[in-house]
Amino acid sequence: MKEITYAQAICEALDEEMERDDNIVMLGEDIGFIGGNFKCTVGLLEKYGDLRVKDTPISEQGFVGMGVGMALTGLRPVIELMFSDFLLVAADQVINQMAKIRYMSGGQANVPMTIRCPIGAGRSSAAQHSQSMQAMVAQFPGTKIVVPSTAREAKGLLKTAIRDDDPVLFLEHKMEYNKKYQIDDDVEPIPFGKARIAREGKDITIAATSSMVMKSEEAAEKLAKEGIECEIIDLRTIVPLDTETIIESVKKTGKLIVADEAHERCGIGAEIAAAVADDIFYYLDAPCGRVANPNVPLPFSPALEFPLIPSADKVYDKVKTYFK
Amino acid sequence: MKVKDYSKEQLTDFYETMFKMRRFEEETFEFYKKGMMAGLAHLYMGEEAVATGVCAALKEDDYIGSTHRGHGHLVARGAEIDRMMAEILGKETGYSNGKGGSMHIMAMDKGILGANGIVGGEIPIATGAAYTIKYKGTDQVAVSFMGDSATNEGTFHESVNMAAAWDLPCIYVIENNLYGISVDIRDVTNTPDLAVRAKGYDIPGVVVDGMDVTAVYEAAKKAVKRAREGKGPTIIECKTYRWQGHHVGDPATYRKRRSETEKEDWMAKCPVTNFRKEIIEAGKVTEDEIKQLEEKVEAEIQAAVKFAADSPYPDASEAFTDVFQEGTL
Ligand SMILES: Cc1ncc(C[n+]2csc(CCOP(=O)(O)OP(=O)(O)O)c2C)c(N)n1
Ligand SMILES: [Mg+2]
């Protein structure tokens, strides 16, 4: 065991994968000389040289598209976008190209690339640097979407992302980067589509993504003291989505909350609630609930931002509405 | 270089490729007129010398990125024309089993990284292929074909800038046919020549007569040599013209704005028929030899038409394959 930050865990995954496979090449803004805006690539330029760890110009469409071309011609590019919000700048390459080339080619081509970028609010970064893009991208078939929770999860899932033969969007939570975690010295790749039961409980299921897993755990501690036992499912990946694990849990608890930081409208919560209602409506003894960002852009002032962000307290409050 | 300086074999290769493209597109147009083709196709007729001249300068393991007007690029790279036609008709035997159509034909085994439905969408992709080449240290090159109008997309600037900064072996070929659908490039761009933008990246930019296959070939050869030597990218602008409208259903009335005879004037410069005449007159080939060649190509075209027409449509379940390696998720 050792203590490292979430950012260091990501850096270790990148390093271990690059060491294993020469075809892994990274492109991104500020990933080389300064080791990344959030310090996820520290030391990699020195170790692997500037053809494999390439500082790019500010050209998101250009270097994401180059990643597609690199992936089509035998490399496994890992592209860092400084903020997930910039996926919108590169959207054509992400959604019309990367995600669709295998399909449009009738399976002749595959695009083994990973795009890493931070999501989430909490730094007064305001409306263009705080968004969570998982639901938006999930709308378009062709990209696997990873929303890791802890440092260990981030490390294991990133290895799988890099080894996958399809495009993967790997969404890191920017409020986690500097948090310290105890993790095993060696972390194996964690398979996609297999959710993790982060906490067992019999009273209510909380299906959570990214940092909402840890926030839900915090809420569950408090709720346990009041005699409410939450079962927390760390979804790990949104595409593929492990509905089986969610459904097994809800069959037991009869209640479901989905905790995901993206905006509530047309979000992951709506998707999972619909899937559960479709499949096991008669097991539910209450409507499915959501903890998400309200449908407003993220504001700057902490006085405005913090009340919006889905927190442990919000999860707690939501759970309490089921046990009046 | 004049045709007299080329070998007979080289000249007949040029002609065969251009003639095949021309006939391919005529038959594609027929498919549309007969109601055999769903959707639309953007025909390459008139621009044959561009793809032919550029691809003649390439080796088998080089890469190309193509556009919505991509049939010619694929024919020039030696893609199988029967599978291309089948794809255009949405048949199971097409390159993408009917999932791509005219605008997305891809032939990975020929280094064709795909036609593309997004104007400018393929430019960074071809540039990425050039990055792979640089990283692997091979002597391959990547060619990015694009229309004149694609040079006004951000991807053009972003890609050429990076290729220039890092000396990537990429050749940017602009097929300047004067129009983006109905919009005249001269009305939306401040320079009559687009290749002048190369100056902004400190790389070579050349303008060539895109109706002359040897002129295109010579420019491409030079650019390819430079790229293979690790000296970086080149922009080649080919002045050309499309015989048909933007796509098979476009009457292209907008082309009379500048001159009543704009189309006829360009058609007088036909890259296929003029070249045919030129090589016969130069004594490089006989009329009979050309006719034999044309018959051979015609047989291939007819076989492809029949193959495509007779092929079955895919089963509806085909839509659910190839989203991911696992199928669907
Ligand atoms: C991003 C984008 N914008 C617009 C279109 C619609 N469109 C398709 S082809 C075309 C014109 C392209 O002109 P040019 O690049 O000169 O190629 P040409 O058709 O002349 O060969 C347009 C506007 C598109 N497919 N993609
Ligand atoms: Mg044009």
Image (spheres, coloured by chain):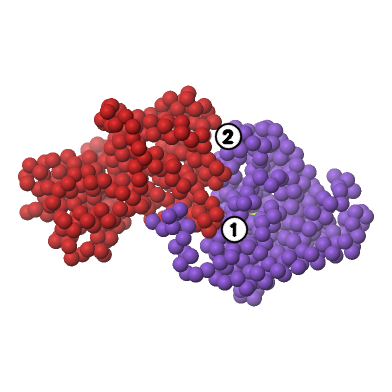
Q: Which mark is residue A254?
A: none
- Which color was chain A given? red
Marks 2 and 1, Cα distance to the nearest angstrom? Answer: 27 Å
Name the quadrant containing residue B227. top right
The kind of residue tagged 1 is: Ile
Residue A277, how many percent across, how many down? 23, 63
Q: Chain of mark 1?
A: B
The quadrant of the rendering that contains the N terminus of chain B is top right
Q: Which chain is purple?
A: B
**What residue is rendered at 79% in x and 54% in y?**
B14
Marks 2 and 1, the one that precedes in the sequence: 1
Name the quadrant containing residue B311. bottom right
Q: Is residue B161 visible?
A: no
Name the quadrant containing residue B178. bottom right
Q: Nearer the viewer, residue B211 or A103?
A: A103
**What residue is rendered at 47% in x and 64% in y?**
B319
Mark 1 sits on what residue? B105
**What residue is rendered at 41% in x and 58% in y?**
B328
Q: Is residue B260 above or below residue B2?
A: below
Q: Chain of mark 2?
A: B
Residue A241, how many percent across, how many down? 32, 53
Residue A82, how many percent across, how many down? 41, 36
Mark 2 sits on what residue? B135
Q: Nearer the viewer, residue A194 or B179?
A: A194
The kind of residue tagged 2 is: Tyr
Residue B118 in the figure: left or right of residue A251: right
